Every structure is written in structure tokens, then in C-alpha cells.
Image: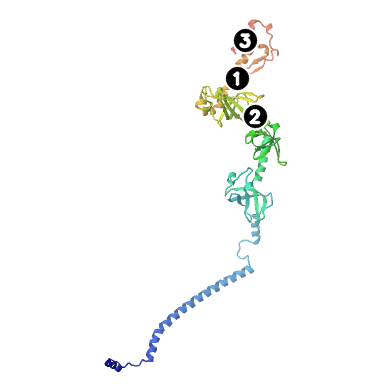
């Protein structure tokens, strides 16, 4: 160990030169400074570019501001007057009662939003959507995209939007329709919706009318007529007084006057009985007896007819005093049994078969009249080729021939001539 220490002690290291350290430090420090310079130069370049862009935008804004201040209409294709004219073109009278066109663009359970080209959308409540009582807008056919004419009935104070109505327009149209029907003196159907001690309340064309008990020909009670339809005619139509008076008696009288013997009418089966079917023919119940349904025997009426069936029937008789009408489909069968096997054919051929039946009746009546004249020439009537009775020729006395002055031969000759005719 001592010798080793002596050896290390004998070693000598050269002194470190300050210049050499400086050179080496410079060698390491030069590249770092160059990199820092490049980064700084790039940052300065970006900053200069952003500054120039800001200056450019600032200049553009200043120029735009100056133009708006000094020449606001420069470059605009229309003038201020044109702008106001365009606004006036879309302006409308928003007073209550004014009619406006609008398009439904949204609906909900309570109503619909309507675009009427105003500052804000207008609103159509569901209770103002129809003259009838509805729960949903779809029942009145109101869906998005529908364009219609509405009437302004109010304003919503919460948002200054307008409230619209279709019901008011429908009421005006209904009154106009009732006036027209009254002028035409036609029979309409009315549904009984209520009553009081004076009469019944019936709905016609969406309007509630009053039918006094004195104008009701039916013997049914008000409770029995409730929710049922029956024929009516207009007595008084006064929109200003909201008065609509109707008559069932007048409608029934006109209906009965049109029931000619041998005519064909369309009816609906109301009820079935063992002896026949009751048919509603324009508000009058007629009886289609089981024997008048078909030429073939009908053992069970339900196999041929059902309540609600629509069929054509012929009027056989009409007792106006008792209000009884006898009907027949048997007379309308093209071939016996068609009412059972092919009722559709009976419906289609009803008018044709009725015409044939009336011709046979006319021929039978003509033959009966001819027989009457043969045995009662003193009646003063003659029978035309059409089977119509008319007065004798003017060269004969109006009171007819006096057979006491005519010889039997002449009488027989006259009869023979008539038979040959």
C-alpha cells in the first residue's frame, strides 16, 4: 500500500487551461443561441401578420361605418319608399270581424297555430274550429298545411296574438243554406237533441231549431224521439233574431201527398214482425206484409230482410186518415221468387217492373170502363183508345141517348160496332 501511494504521489497532471474551457463552452453555447433566434424570428413574423390582419379588418369596419353614416342607401337596389310599400303589401286589418287567409302549420289538443302573415302567429281554439261540437281538430278536417279563410274574433293579451274562428263563418253559411232551403220549400232531416214544455229542439244544418208540439204529427213522446231524425220543413228563418222554427206536420203532409198508388219509393227496414216488416219511407212507416214480399212463400222474414236494409217498394194503398201505407216488393219481382233468391235484381228492375204493372192496371181499368159503358150508355161518356172516359161527341145530346126511342136492332148494332172497335 505504501508503494502504491508513492506511485500515485509521483504522478503529475498538467494544469487546466482557461482558454480551452472557454473554447469548449463556446462550442456548446453557439447552437443553442441560434435556435432561440430562429424561434424568436418566427414569433415576430406571426405577430406581424396578425397585426396586419387586425389592421385590415379595422379599416374595413371603419369604412363600413363611415358608409352607413354618410351614405346608408349606397349599393341598395330599393329605396326606403319601396321598403315601406313592401310592408304595406303584407299589412292587413286586424280588427275584430275581419276575415283573413291563413295556413295551419301546427296543431295540438287545444287548437292550431295559423300563419296569417302577421307579426306573430294567430291561434284557432278547438271550440272555434267547427259549428259542431268536436273534441279534436281532426274531426273538422283541420291538419297542418290546410289553407282556409278565418275571421278574427279577439286578441290574446299575453302575447298580442290574434284569435281566429271558423265556427262564425260556418254559422253564416248555415243560415244562408236554411234560407235557401226554405225558399225551395224542401223537406230536410232534423235530429232531436232536446225538448221543453213547448216542443222539441232539433238540429238542422248545424243550427238548433224549435219544433212546437202543435207541428209534430208523430204520437211518440219527446223521450222516444230523442236522438232520432225525422222530416221537417222550415216555417221561420230569422238570423237576426236567431229564430229557426220548424214543422214536422208540414213535412209529413207533403211526403204523403207524393205517395201515389203504384209509385216506387226507396225505404229502410225499421223492424221485423211475424206478420211483416215496417219500412221507413221518408219519415212515414209503411207495412210490407209477409204476403207481399215475394210470390214464393216466405216462412221466416228474417231470412229475407234485416233491420237497416235498403230496398225499393211499391205503394199499394195509403189510408191518410189512419196514416197507414201498404207496400209491396212482390209486384216488383221480374220472376216469381226473385226477392228471395236475387233481391239485388229486384232493386235494379223496380222502376221497370212498376211501369209494367201500371200498364196492366191501366188496361184492366179500361176494360172495366168499357164494360160499364156497355151496360150504362146513359152515362153520357165514351171510352177513348187510351182507356180514358170523356163526354160523348157534340152531335149527341149531353144527357146521352134515350134507349126507349131506339129499336133493339139499332142497339145491338151499336154494341157490335163498339165491340169491333
Q: Is residue 342 above or below residue 116?
A: above
Considering the numbered disc 3 on the image, is that residue within a helix, a strand or a loop? helix
Residue 186 shows up from this direction: no
Image mark for residue 255: 2
Residues at discs 2 and 3 in contact (Cβ within 8 Å): no
Label 1 belongs to which residue? Answer: 362
Q: What x and y, as percent, mark residue 215?
A: 69, 32
Q: What x and y, as percent, mark residue 233?
A: 67, 33
Q: Quadrant of the C terminus?
A: top right
- Distance from the alpha carbon under mark 1 to that under mark 3: 22 Å
Image mark for residue 244: none
Residue closer to the observer: 258 or 387:
258
Q: Which colour scheme is used?
A: rainbow
Label 3 belongs to which residue? Answer: 415
| Of the image marks 2 and 3, the number of the one nearer the N terminus | 2
Characterize the local packing of mark 3: few (<14), some (14-19) or many (20 or more) Cα atoms within 10 angstroms. Answer: some
Instruction: Specify the quadrant of the image occupied by residue 117.
Output: bottom right
Considering the numbered disc 1 on the image, is that residue within a helix, a strand or a loop? helix
| Of the image marks 1 and 2, the number of the one nearer the N terminus | 2
Q: Of circles 2 and 3, which is in front?
A: 2
Amino acid at each position: 500500500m505504501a508503494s502504491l501511494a508513492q506511485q500515485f504521489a509521483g504522478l503529475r497532471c498538467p494544469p487546466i487551461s482557461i482558454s480551452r474551457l472557454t473554447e469548449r463552452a463556446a462550442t456548446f453555447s453557439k447552437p443553442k443561441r441560434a435556435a432561440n433566434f430562429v424561434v424568436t424570428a418566427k414569433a415576430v413574423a406571426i405577430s406581424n401578420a396578425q397585426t396586419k390582419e387586425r389592421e385590415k379588418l379595422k379599416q374595413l369596419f371603419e369604412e363600413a361605418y363611415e358608409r352607413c353614416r354618410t351614405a346608408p342607401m349606397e349599393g341598395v337596389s330599393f329605396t326606403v319608399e319601396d321598403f315601406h310599400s313592401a310592408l304595406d303589401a303584407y299589412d292587413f286589418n286586424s280588427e275584430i270581424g275581419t276575415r283573413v287567409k291563413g295556413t295551419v302549420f301546427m296543431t295540438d289538443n287545444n287548437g292550431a297555430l295559423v300563419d296569417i302573415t302577421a307579426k306573430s302567429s294567430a291561434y284557432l281554439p278547438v271550440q272555434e274550429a267547427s259549428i259542431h261540437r268536436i273534441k279534436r281538430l281532426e274531426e273538422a278536417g283541420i291538419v297542418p298545411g290546410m289553407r282556409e279563410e278565418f275571421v278574427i274574433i279577439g286578441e290574446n293579451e299575453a302575447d298580442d296574438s290574434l284569435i281566429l274562428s271558423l265556427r262564425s263563418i260556418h254559422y253564416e253559411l248555415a243560415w244562408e243554406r236554411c234560407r235557401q232551403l226554405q225558399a225551395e220549400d224542401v223537406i230536410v232531416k232534423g235530429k232531436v237533441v232536446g225538448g221543453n214544455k213547448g216542443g222539441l229542439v232539433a238540429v238542422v244544418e248545424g243550427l238548433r231549431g224549435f219544433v212546437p208540439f202543435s207541428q209534430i204529427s208523430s204520437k211518440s213522446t219527446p223521450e222516444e224521439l230523442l236522438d232520432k231524425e225525422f222530416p221537417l220543413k222550415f216555417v221561420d228563418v230569422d238570423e237576426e233574431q236567431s229564430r229557426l222554427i220548424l214543422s214536422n206536420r208540414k213535412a209529413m203532409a207533403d211526403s204523403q201527398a207524393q205517395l201515389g198508388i203504384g209509385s216506387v219509393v226507396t225505404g229502410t227496414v225499421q223492424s221485423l214482425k211475424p206478420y211483416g216488416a215496417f219500412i221507413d219511407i221518408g219519415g212515414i212507416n209503411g207495412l210490407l206484409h209477409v204476403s207481399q214480399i215475394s210470390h214464393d212463400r216466405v216462412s221466416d222474414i228474417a231470412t229475407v230482410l234485416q233491420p237497416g236494409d235498403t230496398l225499393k217498394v211499391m205503394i199499394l194503398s195509403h189510408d191518410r186518415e189512419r196514416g197507414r201505407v201498404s207496400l209491396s216488393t212482390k209486384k216488383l219481382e221480374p220472376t216469381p221468387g226473385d226477392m228471395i233468391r236475387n233481391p239485388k235484381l229486384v232493386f235494379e228492375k223496380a222502376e221497370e217492373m212498376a211501369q209494367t204493372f201500371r200498364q196492366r192496371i191501366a188496361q184492366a181499368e179500361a176494360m172495366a170502363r168499357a164494360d160499364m159503358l156497355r151496360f150504362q150508355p146513359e152515362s153520357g161518356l165514351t171510352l177513348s183508345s187510351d182507356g180514358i172516359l170523356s163526354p160523348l161527341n157534340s152531335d149527341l145530346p149531353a144527357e146521352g141517348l134515350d134507349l126507349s126511342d131506339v129499336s133493339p136492332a139499332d142497339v145491338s148494332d151499336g154494341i157490335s160496332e163498339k165491340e169491333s172497335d
